[in-house]
């Protein structure tokens, strides 16, 4: 039996939930101490939402034309911080980090209420907190981070409402409304709660009102408000994508499916919790994912997750400052990336196999045999002379509501959005972690977290039946949890190093842009990249596009440049990390890459020859 101070800390049955919360908060404190959120430049799409915050501070709310999210509660949250600390991208990043900490704490509380052990619940919360995609979003002002927290808060409230009563159902409805006013898919949380109650045959009028009234009012108000707004540029692009789906469904579906298969293996690296090596289901998933990884390698010659544009782990986001040289020049031979991709595919296959087998086991448990009355016809006669009848009881528990929420909230973002982006995987992460942590290896140490109304421990499930004895040998649990806690060190190290490198690169690029502008170059003469162009030129360019009848319908399309600033930029100057044909380098702006071993990389200020 392993008996270390670390093991005693994690698995001592007397470890308080309060201590776990402090550990989660300490993880976030360590993040901001090692990589400060200080920055004064936009990240990815957050220039869109920063503009909305600035409008709210002036007493109005507008959804910028390049935004798809409803973002009202997102803008209000950021505006609250900006009203106190002043408007800046740093302030907005702090507001997201605060929400992220709340989200991780909420996820820990959900795991404990679903009888995941203390050490395993802490592991799950830290895996979510240390996810590199989510950390990147936490340091920005993107809606994915806030939406995840609102979703988890709504799940927690609904979960308690399903276990304890209508008061928490009302709170769940309120948080579902908050979530859908951040991103429209938040309405699916309330839909999941209604479906769960309907399948349980517990959907009464009072519960329906408690679950759905506030989300319905929020959704109705949002639709009425949007009906009075002018058409947005992004809607034209979305409409074109939907038309493509209608006219060429197989091509669009194949594009989304292929990107999903190429991206999916990354989930295993973020949650290495389920190993199912001897399972036939695992073998099937592994075969599919390995085929996707190796097929992509044979097709593209690369073995990383470089599959599209405008995401975090590709050539439009994290990749240039963090992984570009790492992958292709310095320490990134193709065989290394192929090996990592294969490992990720196997880990993801384990997660999917665990989810599939848990579903199959639950379905088998719903079937039972009951005796037929005497004289009844049956091929299986009973000792009493009647026979046996096979019936199925759909015995749902609150954990199934949480799973249903994950499916209804997470899958539409992957399948229905016009563009496929890796950050759309974020809503699925906590639910996949939950599936893995509900396995017996991570079970509660004989003391379920579900409480009776008097606060005492309960040893019975909600239907009154005794809970199974989930106590396992400590050594067995050590062998499952300690390697995964060790993996956390690697995960958070990569996440913070990657975030540092991104900040270093983005600062160098921002400095380069400011230097070019100081030469009396106009903003329309500089192609400074997506964030720069969006922040400085979007409103001007969108107004010009709208002022020309019909122009935006041809400009913004899947085949066109798709971004209003492209219509007004005459790129005499460019900022890039590599030289471009027809341009010469005027000045280099260096930044230090931790991932590249402290080497200096450069953003180039390029001028047309």
Image (tube, helix red, strand yellow):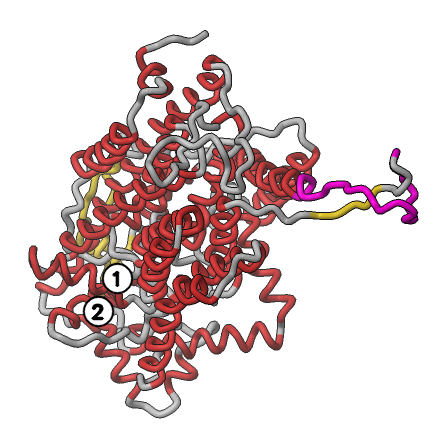
Residue nearest the viewer, comparing 113 with 338 = 113
Q: x, y percentage for residue 561? A: 39, 72
Tell me which numbered mark, 1 or 2, is placed earlier along the sequence: 2
Q: Which region shows up in magenta? A: 363-383
Q: Which quadrant does the C terminus fall into?
A: bottom left
Residue at image mark 1: 74
Residue at image mark 2: 52
* Residue occupying image coordinates x 50% and y 37%: 461
Q: Is residue 504 left or right of residue 477?
A: left
Q: Residues within 10 Å of mark 2 (few under 14, many from 20)?
A: many
Q: x, y percentage for residue 595? A: 30, 34
Task: Evaluate if marks 1 and 2 touch, with contact meaning CB atoms under 8 Å apart.
Answer: yes
Q: Is residue 284 left or right of residue 319?
A: right
* SS at circle 1: helix
* SS at circle 2: helix
Instruction: In the rendered view, tell whether residue 249 sits above or below residue 28.
Output: below
Q: x, y percentage for residue 318? A: 34, 48
């Amino acid at each position: 039996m392993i008996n270390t101070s670390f093991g005693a800390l994690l698995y001592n049955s007397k470890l308080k939930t309060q201590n776990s919360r402090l550990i989660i908060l300490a993880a976030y404190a360590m993040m901001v101490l090692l990589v400060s959120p200080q920055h004064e430049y936009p990240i990815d799409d957050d220039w869109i939402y920063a503009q909305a915050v600035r409008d709210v501070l002036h007493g109005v709310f507008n959804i910028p034309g390049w935004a798809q999210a409803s973002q009202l509660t997102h803008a209000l949250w950021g505006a609250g911080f900006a009203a106190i600390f002043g408007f800046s991208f740093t302030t907005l990043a702090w507001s997201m980090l605060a929400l992220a900490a709340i989200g991780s704490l909420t996820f820990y509380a959900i795991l404990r209420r679903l009888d995941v052990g203390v050490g395993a619940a802490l592991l799950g919360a830290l895996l979510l907190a240390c996810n590199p995609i989510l950390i990147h979003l936490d340091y920005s002002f993107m809606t994915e981070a806030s939406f995840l927290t609102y979703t988890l808060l709504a799940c927690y409230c609904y979960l308690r409402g399903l276990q304890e009563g209508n008061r928490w159902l009302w709170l769940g409805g309120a948080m579902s409304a908050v979530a859908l006013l951040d991103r429209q898919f938040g309405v699916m949380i309330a839909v999941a709660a209604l479906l769960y109650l309907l399948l349980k045959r517990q959907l009464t009028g009072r519960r329906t009102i408690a679950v759905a009234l506030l989300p319905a009012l929020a959704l109705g108000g949002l639709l009425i408000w949007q009906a009075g707004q002018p058409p947005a540029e992004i809607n034209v692009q979305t409409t074109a994508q939907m038309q493509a789906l209608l006219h060429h469904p197989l091509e669009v579906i194949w594009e989304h499916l292929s990107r999903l298969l190429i991206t999916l293996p990354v989930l295993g690296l973020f949650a290495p919790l389920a190993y199912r090596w001897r399972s036939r289901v695992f073998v099937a998933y592994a075969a599919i994912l390995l085929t996707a990884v190796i097929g992509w390698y044979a097709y593209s010659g690369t073995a990383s997750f470089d599959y599209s544009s405008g995401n975090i782990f590709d050539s439009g986001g994290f990749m240039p400052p963090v992984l570009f040289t790492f992958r292709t020049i310095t320490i990134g031979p193709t065989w290394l990336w192929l090996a990592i991709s294969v490992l990720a595919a196997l880990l993801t296959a384990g997660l999917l196999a665990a989810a599939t087998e848990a579903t199959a086991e639950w379905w088998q448990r719903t079937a039972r045999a009951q005796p037929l009355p005497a004289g009844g016809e049956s091929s299986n006669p009973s000792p009493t002379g009647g026979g046996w009848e096979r019936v199925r009881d759909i015995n749902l528990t609150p954990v199934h509501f949480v799973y249903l929420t994950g499916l209804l909230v997470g899958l539409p973002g992957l399948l229905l959005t016009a563009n496929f982006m890796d950050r759309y995987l974020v809503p699925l992460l906590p639910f996949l972690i939950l599936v893995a942590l509900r396995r017996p290896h991570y079970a509660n140490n004989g003391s379920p977290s579900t409480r009776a109304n008097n606060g005492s421990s309960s040893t019975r499930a909600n239907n009154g039946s005794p809970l199974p004895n989930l106590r396992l040998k400590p050594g067995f649990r050590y062998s499952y949890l300690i390697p995964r806690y060790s993996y956390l060190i690697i995960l958070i190290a990569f996440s913070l190093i990657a975030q540092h490198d991104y900040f270093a690169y983005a600062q160098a690029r921002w400095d380069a842009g400011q230097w070019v502008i100081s030469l009396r170059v106009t903003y329309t003469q500089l192609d400074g990249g997506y964030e720069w162009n969006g922040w400085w030129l979007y409103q001007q360019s969108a107004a010009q596009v709208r002022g020309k009848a019909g122009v935006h319908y041809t400009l913004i399309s899947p085949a066109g440049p798709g971004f209003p600033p492209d219509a007004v930029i005459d790129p005499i100057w460019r900022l890039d990390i590599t030289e471009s044909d027809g341009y010469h380098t005027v000045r280099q702006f260096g930044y230090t890459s931790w991932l590249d071993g402290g080497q200096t990389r450069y953003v180039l200020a390029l001028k047309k020859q």
